[in-house]
Amino acid sequence: MSGIYGLVRLDQTPAATDFASMKRALEHWGPNGHSSWFGDSVVLGQALLRSTPEASFELMPALACGNTVCLTAAARLDNRDELCDTFGIDSSDRARVSDGRLILLAFERWGQACVHRLLGDWSFAVWNRQTQSLFLARDHYGNTGLHYCFKNNRFAFSSGIEGLLALEGVGAQANGQKIAELLILWACDGVGTFYKDIFRLPPAHTLSFQNGVVKTERYWKLEDTRSFRLRSDAEYVEAFQAILRTAVKSRLRSNRPVASTLSAGLDSGAVTALAAEALRERNDTLTAFTSVPVHAPDRPSQHGLDDEWGLANQTATWIKNVSHLPLDAATWTPLAGVRKSMGILQEPEFATANSYWVQALLSELQSQGFGVLLTGQCGNFAASWSGGTYRTWTALGAGAFGHALDQFVSGASQRQSYTRALLAEIMKPAWLTADAGLKRLRRANQPPWDKSSAISESLVQRIGLLEQTRAAKWFGLELFLMNARQQQALGLMPAITPIGAIWHSLGAGYGIEVRDPTMDKRLLEFCVGAPQSQFSRGGHDRFLMRHAKPAARIGAVEHQTRRAGFGLGAASVGE
């Protein structure tokens, strides 16, 4: 995906010098060129990566609204046909209309409220020449990033942090708060970066800058998704399959070959299967990569899968339209992966142990000429949500007594004992809850994070970390104290998660666009709004994903998803 950047100077100093520094730092973001628009002490830019056929016609930044506003965008829209219908664009002309152009038309039609009408991965910036104001916006929950800083009478923004670090006087001080959050594994607000002067615009947020005032606003809340009911288990399964298929198919629009990650799990397997199915219809083949160990372990793990190739290869063979390739990352050491990641992101990332094979994968994709990588990273807490931990206990706490009974009976059947089920499903979480409460009373002034954390006491004292976590009611990952929906939100971290920004920057480092169908707004709303009983049923977790059939009858269930408010081709408006 392309990148965007720009700045506004309040002291009427020409922006050309600062902009040139940003452009040099972001050179790798635009393998297909950089373009810019200069106003009075204002400049907007785009670093172009053509990842779709329509991107060949991208011309950004562009003027609109009678030349009173200038807009630049980095976007891949998933509801193009709906938008083209709205704007009266003939079917014969749509192939020449870029996604950025559609955002421009949407802004002309709806103004800042256009954010409710756009589906996909996107970010954009608009400078209003009349009001002398800047407006930034980022998608609901996609693989995009947008960062900003306001210092020395200069407001600047950039898809990648490196564009801001190139500015004089920015990035000299580390952000101790963010370092502390990383060391205790606390996802605080999604805004801070590891630099004191640089901030991240979280998903589903807009930013307005005028007269030296920065104001951010959240325009969509996944947590507020309304619950819905369908008539039968079969309808939930078929509706889920239809939405997931649409999410995958809409992310296959590419002007270069598409690849996917394929593990032994359900999410990447489902994404790969549906992508291969769609590509088969146009006589194309999907290439799937599976990370494999360089050396076989001395003894098999009792708690995980050491080598996912065997099960992943069975999946690929069953799908048929897949070229399945192993990735052993033999030329990458863990330390080399961390260094490369730091070089691209300019800050640490979570789960650094995976850096080496992620870098190996992106490097391999680049060398083979791929343009798009499909993943299923968000699936664990949405498409293949397990239903939560201690499901009988959490169902009782939520007042879902029928679901709690089903979970208890299923647990007793699996354990072949009602007594064992009572101990494991009710007594254990009840004891853990009581024990946690007593520990908090006894350790009211002690930190809630694990004793093995590398955080220093001086940093804890300097930023008042204990008081912060107490005020935020953060006590570590005590999942038995949360209901299933709270556990789901903890994993998804809406409006907080940095994963989209990470993938946007990592992809830019290799000229690859990373797309995740399990991040689709329509799919997320469906999985959060569906009853928790649909995710754990009859002793099985991840019920919806396990029962989805390869050939769902989409036409037969589309009216049901529309009835529930999850239309396959329309964005929800006015949340």
Image: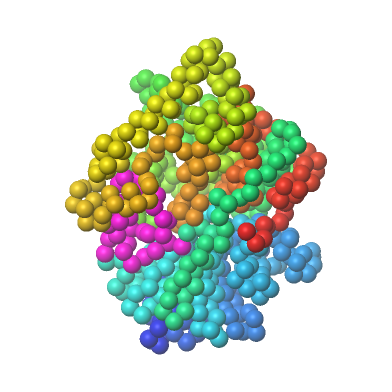
Q: Residue at x 55, y 75 (%)?
A: 126
Drawn side of residue 429 relative to residue 403, left or right:
left
| Figure check: 370 above or below 132 | above
Could you tell me which residue is drawn at 59 percent across and 44 percent down? 528
Q: Is residue 341 above or below residue 88?
A: above
Q: Measured along the vertical axis of the image, is residue 290 above or below residue 61?
A: above
Which span of residues is magenta-colored?
173-201
User: Farthest top residue?
Assistant: 416
Looking at the picture, tell me which residue is in the foreground, 151 or 63: 151
Image quarter hosting the N terminus: bottom right
Is most of the magenta stretch helix, strand or loop? loop
User: Residue 165: in sight, yes or no?
Assistant: yes
Q: Is residue 294 magenta?
A: no
Which residue appears at 42% of the width and 68% of the height?
148
* x and y percentages locating residue 575 in the rendered image: 62, 59
**Residue 331: image location, x then y, percent:** 37, 41
- Based on the picture, tell me whether residue 185 belongs to the magenta stretch: yes
- Say if 174 sits above or below 319 in the image: below
| Of residues 431 and 389, the one drawn nearer to the viewer in this rendering | 431
Q: Quadrant of residue 395?
A: top right
